Image (cartoon, helix red, strand yellow):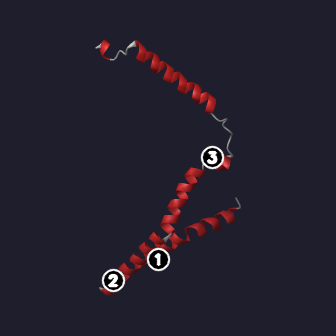
Amino acid sequence: MRTLFRLPAHDRRRTVIAAASVVVAQFVFAEIASAQELGQAFAPLQAIFQAVVDFITGPFGRLCAIIAVMSLGFLAWVGRLSWFLAGGVAVGIGFVFGGPGIVDALIAIVGS
């Protein structure tokens, strides 16, 4: 079993030379790492969250709200509309699309 994974001498030399070449190339071509600003450290995460907000408050969220209002209209048409459900849908739509404004207003009030 030991001889199964044993390389011939010329292959071992090639492997060592290739590994040494990679290490030398890493040192030669490496750029000096410069410190990022603290605000930019989380830029990728911020971009992901902004994409989620844009997705929800964009055309997809608008279409979902339209379908919810149409569902309320259908429930009213068949006589099954609960005013509690209608109020919940209206408040939910207000929170979804007014969320950024609500958060900005709260931040302005706190003064942070």
> Which quarter of the rendering shows the N terminus?
top left
State the residue at coordinates (31%, 82%). 80
Which of label 1 and label 3 is nearer to you?
A: 3
Q: Where in the figure is residue 65, as x and y percent of width and height?
A: 44, 75
The image's mark for residue 78 is none
Q: Is residue 78 left or right of residue 69?
A: left
**Three-letter amino acid code at the position of disc 2:** Phe
State the residue at coordinates (66%, 63%). 107
Which of label 2 and label 1 is nearer to you?
A: 2
Which of label 3 and label 2 is nearer to you?
A: 3
The image's mark for residue 74 is 2
**Which quadrant would residue 11 be assigned to in this image?**
top left
Q: CA distance from mark 1 to mark 3?
A: 38 Å
Q: CA distance from mark 3 to mark 2?
A: 49 Å
**Which quadrant would residue 15 be assigned to in this image?**
top left
Q: CA distance from mark 2 to mark 1?
A: 15 Å
Q: Earlier in the sequence, mark 1 or mark 3?
A: 3
SS under mark 1: helix
Labels in figure, total: 3
**Three-letter amino acid code at the position of disc 3:** Ala
SS under mark 3: loop
Residue beneath disc 3: 41
Above-or-below relation of 35 to 16: below
